[in-house]
Image (spheres, helix red, strand yellow):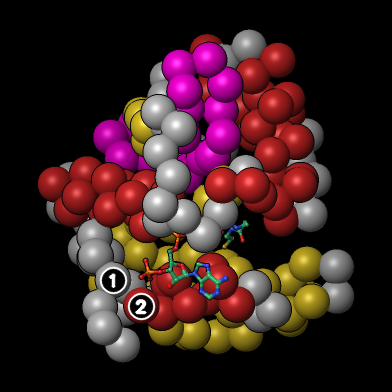
Amino acid sequence: MIDLGLEWTPAPPLDDWSNHRLESVRKLILETTGESYEIDRLRCLPLDQDFGRWVLTDGESDFGILWVMRLSKECARVLAFSIAAELQGNGIGARGWRGFAKAANRSGVRAVQLEVRQDNRPAITMYHRRGLRPLGRIVGFYRGQDGWLMRGPLLPEASSQ
Ligand SMILES: CC(C)(COP(=O)(O)OP(=O)(O)OC[C@H]1O[C@@H](n2cnc3c(N)ncnc32)[C@H](O)[C@@H]1OP(=O)(O)O)[C@@H](O)C(=O)NCCC(=O)NCCS
């Protein structure tokens, strides 16, 4: 387990972010998922103000994001979850999920859904261990790769499954 003084912190509305900050997150998403977004599109994401705007930061730069919208009173949808490649696999994602889940639970959210590429073993394992299950296949989800729509209860901790 490494600790570089990085904290998961609620961020201000993306509308208030500088282009420079959004550009660095755009690159982070591209490098970690291969998905390419326009900055203006990121700025418009309908992130929930109470539990949906997490950044992993050292106070100066962003090293991860966990961005979530509210789909309904009781259900949230994860729109982006990325951690810089060199930091992955150290328990940081689990920590981010815990903070998000607790905040969302306090806001009455009990379920969560998201889309993930079928070849993304680490992410699928992480979600499966938190109770999410594939609900349906998304054909051609990303660059010819199929995806899973996963859904389940919103739990802060992994289970032993
Ligand atoms: C997916 C991601 C956010 C997880 O964050 P992380 O910091 O690497 O994950 P952690 O080290 O906290 O591990 C969390 C769990 O993920 C799973 N996991 C992590 N790395 C894994 C690996 N190499 N193989 C299998 N499972 C793995 C485990 O279940 C792990 O343990 P836990 O369930 O006991 O907590 C991060 O790896 C990432 O940014 N990946 C690239 C972008 C991406 O795929 N995002 C998800 C899109 S839906």
x and y, in percent, of residue 110 in the image: 21, 63
**Residue type highlighted by circle 1:** Ala
Residue designated by label 1: 158
Q: Quadrant of residue 144?
A: bottom right
> Which residue is depicted at the point 70% across and 27% down?
24
- Where 6 sits versus 99, above or below? above
Q: Is residue 40 visible?
A: no
Report the magenta residues as a range. Answer: 48-72
Disc tally is 2
Density class for disc 1 (Cα within 10 Å; few <14, some 14-19, many ≥20) is some
Q: Secondary structure at mark 1?
A: loop
Q: Which residue occupies 76% across, 47% down?
A: 31
Label 2 CB sits under 8 Å from any ligand 1 atom: yes
Q: CA distance from mark 1 to mark 2?
A: 5 Å
Give the label on residue 117, or none: none
Amino acid type, residue under disc 2 in the picture: Arg
| Position above or below: 122 against 61 | below
Foreground pick, 93 / 75: 93
In front here: 120 or 36? 120
* Front in this rendered view, residue 97 or 145: 97
Residue at the (46%, 55%) spot, across then down:
90
Q: Earlier in the sequence, mark 1 or mark 2?
A: 2
Q: Is residue 19 left or right of residue 128?
A: right
Q: Examine the structure image and report whether residue 85 is included in the region drawn in magenta.
A: no
What residue is disc 2 on? 129
Q: Give 104 or 73, whichever is nearer the viewer.
A: 104
Task: Assess whether residue 65 is covered by the magenta stretch.
Answer: yes
Kindly tell me whether residue 36 is visible in this rendering: yes
Proximity of marks 1 and 2: CB atoms separated by less than 8 Å: yes
Label 2 residue SS: helix
Residue 86 percent location from the top left of the image: 64, 47
The CB of the residue at mark 1 lies under 8 Å from ligand 1: yes
